Amino acid sequence: MTYDTLIRRACIVDGTGADTYVADIGIRGDRIVAIGDLAAGLASQVIEAEGRYLAPGFIDVHTHDDSCAIQQPEMLPKITQGVTTVIVGNCGISASPVNVTGEVPDPMNLLGEADAFFTTFGDFAQAVDAASPAVNVAALIGHTTLRAAAMDRFDRTATDSEITTMRESLRKALQAGAIGLSSGLAYTNARQSTSEEVKALVEVVGKEGGLYATHMRNEREALFEAMDEAFETAAHGKVALVISHLKCADVENWGKTEHAIEKLEQAAARQPCNCDCYPYAACSTTLDLWRVSEAFDILVTWSKPHPEMGRKLLKDIAAEWAVDLTEAARRLMPAGAIYHNMDEADVRRVLAHPLTMIGSDGLPSDPNPHPRLWGSFPRIIGHYCRDEGLFGLPEAIRKMTSMSAARFGLADRGVIREGAFADLTLFDFDSVRDGASFLEPTTPAIGIEWVMVNGRLSLVDGTVKARAGRLLRRPGSLANAGHEPHSVPAH
Ligand code: ZN
Ligand code: CU
């Protein structure tokens, strides 16, 4: 039997949560075609993998890589972690469909300047295809982006005719291959929308197919009410729900994950729902006055009017200017920040739960990014699995692969089996770890030996050798007609 690539004697952790086993893997084209003892097989490329673990390429379910995939297609922060697919368009902000001129509204500015945005999803899809990123990309459509396209101001709920406009552009995007809707209801520019406004959009997702991911209205004192709103909204459209970065922010709310997890479990018994989580007790987003607090450290990462204040603590900037924190924040905005506002016990409780997938929520446009951008996935394996024993290796990998592929509808990915796409990551379990820290946020991970995307060796020795990623269009979308996964070659 001949293969394009033969991987020998890898310890396979297949993504399903099953026990690991040692085998050879044969790859032809972009698919795994054989698993077992392939000692008699011939291949143009043979890779010895004895003593290392081979996993499905990791799926980063929560990213803001919309424009990164186009402008920095090597996708280094992700592929160096073993990530082979990113879900973009989270937290209500997507790069399409919207036409932005001038100042980009908060928090869409997390994606970049006006040139990061596209009038239609088709234009965005074309730009991704043309850029040929190193990892696969699947895209949600953001509620705040739809608002920016349909409304002249954000400080009110949408009118009926604006809702009609948003529904139509969402429908078109879903038909062109977008995989669902996201919202960011906590943000100033989405907060004034009612549940009814969001439900009207989720209805469209229910009809066309896709899921609903939400950065909820509240992750603090009203966390439980916000969860109820999310469950109800998704149920209204009969769509699957992903609660983004489930957390309890601010000291007064620490410990609430215990009940939040209970609520998630109860909801999961009646409707499809999961959450995602990143492995750090600090969050990062734009700087906004209502987020400012004296109770925890706030690190400013960027500021439009005061770029020189990046990497400084808000309290130090305030002291330097002899003003209070709020006034300092006001002068710095638009700006980005890291907020050390979570409790490690909450983070662990959410990470460990079987309904939780891993998503980095990394911000690639940030000059001083939160280390989750470069470190989340190796940190799950090295720190939380190996060093802390929070979960076993098969379960750690399941949270980053098969569960994610199933929930986001990524056919034949997230699992090692015959017929699946050859998205693969080989790592050394003893040495794998995150390299990025709050002080050195862009240091690549250690211990990821190589990464394969769609059958092509793409990262070797920390260097990108190929950019074989694809835009993954929603199965069943009109645009997918010519892109249906081809049948598995015979072997
Ligand atoms: Zn968010
Ligand atoms: Cu996010």
Image (tube, rainbow, N blue to C red):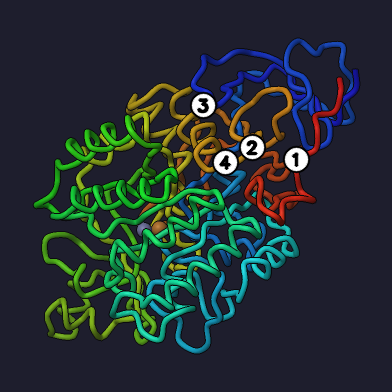
Gap between marks 4 and 2, in whole Å? 6 Å
Q: Which residue is mark 1?
A: 485
The residue under the point 63% across, 35% down is: 413
472 relative position to 441: left or right: right
Return the residue at label 2.
Answer: 411
Q: Amino acid at mark 3?
A: Phe
Q: Nearer the viewer, mark 4 or mark 3?
A: 4
- Dot 3 corresponds to which residue? 429
Q: Position of residue 66 (x, y in %)?
A: 56, 63
Q: Label 1 is placed on what type of residue?
A: Pro
Give the Cα distance between marks 3 and 1. Answer: 32 Å
Is disc 2 in contact with disc 1, using a CB cutoff of under 8 Å? yes
- Callout 2: helix, strand or loop? loop
Disc 3 + disc 2, Cβ < 8 Å: no
Q: Earlier in the sequence, mark 4 or mark 3?
A: 4
Q: Earlier in the sequence, mark 1 or mark 4?
A: 4
**What's the CA distance linking mark 3 and mark 2?**
28 Å
Location of the N terminus (image quadrant): top right
Residue type at the position of mark 2: Ala
In the displayed structure image, the side of residue 351 where residue 393 appears, left or right: right
Residue at 61% over, 32% down: 56
Please identify the quarter of the rendering in which residue 484 is found. top right
Q: Is residue 265 visible?
A: yes
Image quadrant, ligand 2: bottom left
Spot occupied by residue 353 in the image (x, y as percentages of width and height) = 32, 31
| Residue drawn 80% across the image and 38% down it | 486
Q: Which residue is mark 4?
A: 409
Q: Earlier in the sequence, mark 3 or mark 1?
A: 3
Q: Residues within 10 Å of mark 2 (few under 14, many from 20)?
A: some
Can the viewer see residue 95 in this picture?
A: no
